[in-house]
Amino acid sequence: MAETVFITGIMGQDGAYLAELMLKQGKRVVGGVRRSSTANDWRLRSLGVHNDVELVDFELLEYSLIHRLLERIQPNRVFNLAAQSFVGASFEQPLFTSDVDAMGPLRMLEVIRAVNPDARFYQASTSELYGKVVETPQSEMTAFYPRSPYAVAKAFAHYMTRNYREAYGMHASAGILFNHESPLRGQEFVTRKITVGLARIANGTQDLLELGNMDAKRDWGHARDYVAGMALMTEQEKADEYVLATGVTTSVRDFVDMAARATGFDLEWSGEGIDETARDRKSGKLLVQVNPAFFRPTEVELLLGDPAKARAQLGWNATTTIEELATEMAEADLRRTRDTDVAF
Ligand code: NDP
Ligand code: GDP
C-alpha cells in the first residue's frame, strides 16, 4: 500500500509544492484545509494537482479534531506547514499567532505521541528564529534571537519538536528554512507584493508600489527546492534539525531592481530613508516610494544562511538563483494581471 502523507497547510505555498512532490513519488496525499468562507485551491490548481489530493477539514486550534483525523488517516509522515505565517500580522495578532504557531505544533506532537508515535514528523521552523542575528552566516549552531511574536511562537514549536524527539524517541525533525518564494507566494510577502505591484503598474491598474524597509536583506530561495529538502529530512534514519538556505543575501531594493527589469522597467533610485523613490528611466514615471506604515516595530535586518549541514548530510542544494526567482515571479504576475478573472 502506498505511504500516506498528511500535510497541514496544503493550501499554502509550500503545501502545494510538497503535495506535487509527494504525488510524483507515488504517495497518497491527504491535506488539511482550514474552514473558511472563501476556501481557495488556486495553488493546487495551478500545479495541476487539485484532483489528486484528498482534502480534509483541519484546524490547528482544535485538539480533538486533530486526534480523530490522525486516528482515521494513520499517516506515515506528517508535515506541519500550517501557520499564521506573516511576521507583520503577528505584531497585530500576537495571541492568535501564538495559539496557532506555538500551541498548534504542540497539539500535533501530542496527538502523534498518543495515536501514531511511529509516524515521521516535520515542523516548519524558520530563519526568523535568528532575528537580531548574533553571527553571520547563520547555521544550526547559531543562537536564536527572535524579533516578532511570530518568531517567538516558532521558537517554542522548534524546541518542543526537539523535546519530543529526545523525550519520546519520536522521528521529529525541524527545518530552519530561510525565506523561500515562488509565483505561489502570498501577496502580503515583500517579493510577491513587488512582482504583483510592478505587473499591475505595467498593465495600468496600479499607480505606485509602496514599500517599507528597503535595506532589509534576505536569503531568498525557490519554494520548490525547499520542499524537496523537507522531504529529505523525513527520509533520514535519524530525525534532526537542518538549515535550508542559498548562502546568498539580497536587499529588498535589489530585488525590486531585478523584478523591475523582468517587468520591462529600468529603475533610477534617488533620495534616502523615507524619502527614497525609484522612477522608470524611460518614462520618468514615479514607480516606487517608501511608506513607513510598512515598517515593523522590531525588524530583522539581515538573514544569510549556511546550508553546509544539509548539503553534506541530505545532499540538498538550492538550485535557483535570485535573478531566476525574480524573473519567474515577475513573468508569472505579468501574465496573471493581464487575465483579471484568475484568482492568484
Ligand atoms: P502560507 O501562509 O502560504 O501557508 C500556510 C497555510 O497554513 C495556509 O494554507 C493557511 O490556511 C494554513 N493555516 C493557517 N492557520 C491555520 C490554522 N489555524 N489551522 C489550519 N491551517 C491553518 O505559508 P508557506 O507555505 O509559505 O509556509 C509554510 C510553513 O513554513 C509555515 O509554517 C511558515 O511559517 C513556514 N516558513 C515559511 C517560510 C517561507 O519563506 N515561505 C520560511 C520559513 C518558514 P489558509 O489558506 O486558510 O490561510
Ligand atoms: P519575512 O522575512 O518573513 O518577514 O518576509 P517578508 O517578505 O514579509 O519581509 C521581508 C523583509 O522585507 C522584511 O525585512 C520587511 O520589513 C521588508 N519589507 C519592506 N517593505 C515591505 C513591505 O511592503 N511588505 C513586506 N511584507 N515586507 C517589506
Image (cartoon, grey):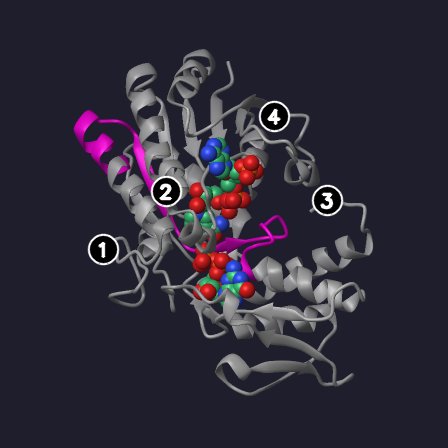
Q: Which residue is mark 4?
A: 53
Q: Residue furthest left?
A: 167
Distance between mark 2 and mark 4 Cα atoms: 32 Å
Q: Secondary structure under badge 1?
A: loop
For image coordinates 19% across by 32% down, the residue present is: 166
Q: Is mark 4 within 8 Å of ligand 1?
A: no
Between the residue at mark 3 and the residue at mark 4, the CA separation in whole angstroms equals 20 Å
- Badge 3 marks a residue whose secondary structure is loop
Which mark identifies residue 95?
2
Picture coordinates of residue 296, whole percent (x, y): 43, 64
First in residue order: circle 2 vs circle 3: 2
Mark 2: few, some, or many residues within 10 Å (few <14, many ≥20)? some
Rounded to the nearest angstrom, the CA distance separating label 4 from label 1 is 37 Å
Rendered residue at 75%/60% (across/down) = 334
Q: Which mark is residue 343?
A: 3
Label 4, secondary structure: give it.
Answer: loop
Which amino acid, by three-letter code, is at mark 1? Met
- State which quadrant residue 37 falls in: top right
**Mark 4 belongs to which amino acid?**
Val
Mark found first going from the N terminus, 3 or 1: 1
Is residue 334 part of the magenta span, yes or no? Answer: no
Q: Position of residue 60 (x, y in %)?
A: 43, 30
Q: Are marks 3 and 1 in contact (CB under 8 Å)?
A: no
Q: Earlier in the sequence, mark 2 or mark 4?
A: 4
Badge 4 density bin: few <14, some 14–19, many ≥20, Cα 10 Å: some
Amino acid type assigned to the residue bearing label 2 in the image: Leu
Q: Quadrant of residue 261?
A: bottom right
Residue 308 image position (x, y, % from top left): 33, 56
Q: Is residue 213 above or below residue 124?
A: below
Disc 2 to disc 1, C-alpha distance:
29 Å
Q: Earlier in the sequence, mark 2 or mark 1?
A: 2
Q: What residue type is disc 3 on?
A: Ala
